[in-house]
Image (cartoon, grey):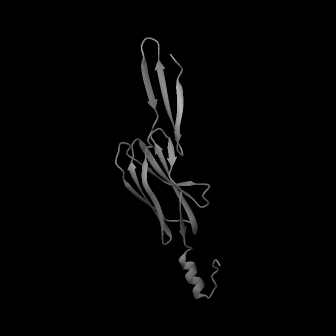
Amino acid sequence: MKKLKIYKIATTMSTTIFFSAIFCLTSYSGFWAHSNFNKPPIELAYFKARAEGEKVLLTWETKSEQRAAYIAVEFSNDNKYFERLTKIELVSLHRKGRFYRYIDNSPYAGYNYYRLKLVDLDEQFDYSETISVFVEPVREITKTMKKKNIPLLTKP
């Protein structure tokens, strides 16, 4: 039997796709091919965030959720170190997409960064794109400052 040859076809952000072929030349001519064109466990249609007053509303929709275990919503205030805000357990046999929403009730004033960790039943995971939203400083402080004639510092 000839040696197994593996050919690298493509690399995506988190998955490398390989194609392998085995040629059996001993007693008869045979051919066998295998590929690992694995679809991600969760396919996102979109992922959005918007400030609503002093809160942030996150919305997303999935196209499919085959072999999916859960979705974790992650947050960062510096776009470097992320922490989990919540974990949403999924029904792994759910083939059609679904709509989700999550409200961050205590974002930081300024830029907030969010991403989704998409995890399958084998604990393999992928991340969504990272999105950011700007949250205005707390309004009560601004109102108090105006009443007491304290000047507000703004960007030039």
What is the x, y in percent for residue 138? 55, 74
In the picture provided, is 97 more to the left or to the right than 2? left
The quarter of the displayed image where residue 93 is located: top left
What is the x, y in percent for residue 127? 51, 49
Front residue (pair 27, 137): 27
In percent of the image, x 41 and y 41: which residue is there? 67
Compared to residue 139, the image places residue 59 above or below, namely above
Quadrant of the image containing the C terminus: bottom right
In percent of the image, x 43 and y 11: which residue is there? 27
In percent of the image, x 57 and y 66: which residue is there? 111
In percent of the image, x 55 and y 83: which residue is there? 143
How many numbered discs sit on the rendered protein? 0
In the picture provided, is 148 more to the left or to the right than 58? right
Front residue (pair 5, 53): 5
Compared to residue 6, the image places residue 64 above or below, namely below
What is the x, y in percent for residue 126? 51, 46
